[in-house]
Image: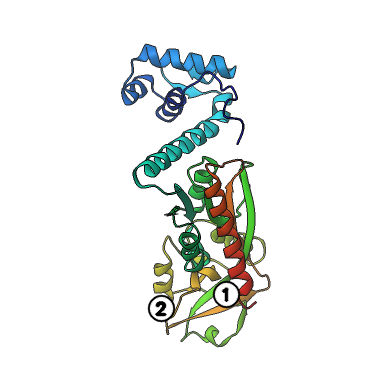
Amino acid sequence: MSEPWRRLPALSLKQIQYFVTLAQLRHFTETANQMAISQPALSSALRQIESVLGGKLFHRTAQAVTLTEQGEAILPHAKGLLNVAHAAFADMRQVMAEGGDGSLRIGLIPSACALMFPLAAARLPQQFPGLRVEFQDHTNDGLLQALAEGALDAGIGVLDGELPDSLEVTPLLDDALVAVVNRQDQLATEAVLCWQQLAHRDIALFARGNVSRQVNGLAQSQLPGLKPRYTTDYVETLHGLVRSGLAIAILPRLYTAHLCDPQLKVVALHEPVLSRTLALMWAKGLSRSTRIDEGRALLRSTIIEQLNSQPS
């Protein structure tokens, strides 16, 4: 933390809130009504922000309000500042009312639950009984955005494409894609399948995300006979299609960690081996308290310990 007496810019959190709200609503009247101020006061506050920051943030015409290039660039930082402030105020109110050390906000994509529960989730309150631990489900895109904007203290997600420069990343696990087949299918007798064996079979995939992009990319570049037939948002629907004998599902192995269905078999895929990388991520320089930093460090060490103890 920097020295508390270090001089701050002559801006209030309320003014930052005006900027973020207008950037989202793109309408002065609606923003003024939402923030319960007059339009002249809103305009004056925005002029002060532009003066302090040294640049124009909005283009305003009779038809529309749009962000300038500089406005677009600073918007994530402004959102992050507000999210950290909201979390800090919530922690202070909690400490005043109940005691304790505040809250550690952890975001997860659904398949990462196998890395978090039960060991890491149980160890955090044992080590830090005064720290309230919150778990939030996110899509991977939503997780990355929430981390970059300071709405989460840590998150476990997939390294997919370009990550925001503001994130610190600890890779945890390469999670290989596998096939889930009906045990009555002739392919269920195989210990390992090559992708060529799936050509001209009906394939079921998640509708969005890293897996869909990898499989469709493989089909376009190497296996034109590999054509996904079904896409869905939920793993149970994938399993249902396989149980019904309608498709073979392709998904990351972590999704099958607790699969105990006698009708289904998980088979490794190779030639090529496709995988995704799961990582623990947090915003660089975001330190709301020493206890939260310690909780995040324990989370990291516990997950790595758990992964190292598993048979390879």
Left or right placement of residue 50 versus residue 162 in this view:
left
Disc 2 secondary structure class: helix
Q: Dot 2: few (<14), some (14–19), or many (≥20) neighbours within 10 Å? A: many
Q: Dot 1: few (<14), some (14–19), or many (≥20) neighbours within 10 Å? A: some
Q: Nearer the viewer, residue 294 or 79?
A: 294
Q: Report the quarter where the N terminus lies.
A: top right
Question: What residue is at 59 percent from the left and 59 percent from the top?
Answer: 300
Give residue 243's position: percent from left, percent from top.
Answer: 40, 78
Give residue 69's position: percent from left, percent from top.
Answer: 58, 25
Choose mark 2 or mark 1, whichever is in front: 2
Question: Residue beneath label 1, please?
Answer: 198
The amino acid type found where label 1 is placed reads: Leu
Of callouts 2 and 1, which one flags the residue occurring earlier in the amino acid sequence? Answer: 1
Question: What residue is at 64 percent from the left and 42 percent from the top?
Answer: 165
Q: Can residue 202 be seen in this snapshot?
A: no
The amino acid type found where label 2 is placed reads: Arg
